[in-house]
Amino acid sequence: MVDNDREDVQEVPYEALARARSSTSFPQPTRHTLYDIRWPAELPDLASAAAEAFAQSAQAVSNPTSATRVFDELPSEPGDAAGLMVRSAGVAAAHAFATDIAGWERHDDEELEIMLFSLGAFIEKAGTGGGLFRRLLAQGAFEIAQMTGDEATTSSARSASRAAEAWTTVARSATARDKPARSRVRDAAQSALALPELEAMLTQDLQVKSQVVV
């Protein structure tokens, strides 16, 4: 098995692999899912393929079909990070997160330490948004812009880069070693206020790019 959580290839017993592939735990049930990838004989036109991909991304974050709910027993009170993670999606999740994190101070110091550490990990390593994946989007868009000469793609890349930096700022605020947990959560909450607008701007740029005739 290869995973970004480990530096080397890991040997996993078949029994453990079967349990993992049938998991119903966070972030979502796997149900032994397999993806059969069939490579085309010829690559499609890059500009057209990129425009379609950007359109799908914009649609996914602006109008998610449904919020994923894995743990029905989780409470959904303000300041409940676990409930937030499985009930919000897309641009709306950035709004929900920026609102929710302001209430995290109601937790005790031990809980806050766990929450802030986890927040940093989800933003920079394990999550499907945040600093890591926004940075991947920016890098990919910049490469596409260089290969196609398309200004709209360059704009999308810049928006993704700004969003990535904003998410990373939240992660760094949450995991700073020189401050107590309550100071860090206040800093992270303040940094998170910028996220909804930046995510909305990124979505708008992706939508504009997808509408460009290529």
Image: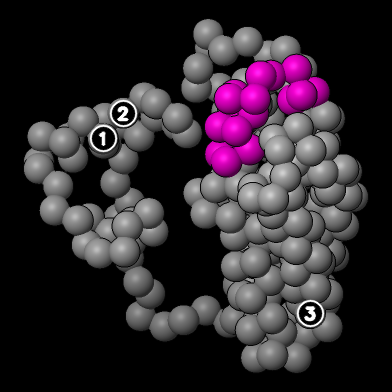
Q: Nearer the viewer, mark 1 or mark 3?
A: 1
| Residue 77 occupies quadrant | top right
Q: Mark 1 points at which residue?
A: 20
For the C terminus, which image quadrant?
bottom right
**Residue under the image location 72 percent in, 45 percent down:** 179
Q: How crowded is mark 1: few (under 14 residues within 10 Å), some or many (20 or more)?
A: some
**Residue under the image location 9 percent in, 43 percent down:** 13
Determine contact: label 2, label 1, CB under 8 Å.
Answer: yes
Judged by its main secondary structure, the magenta piece is helix
Label whose residue precedes the other's in the sequence (2 or 3): 2
Q: Can residue 71 be seen in this view?
A: yes
Q: Which stretch did the figure color magenta?
A: 103-118
Q: Can residue 171 be seen in this view?
A: no
Determine contact: label 1, label 3, CB under 8 Å.
Answer: no
Front-lying residue, 51 or 157: 157
Residue 204 picture location, percent across and down = 86, 57
Q: Mark 2 points at which residue?
A: 23
Q: Residues within 10 Å of mark 3 (few under 14, many from 20)?
A: many
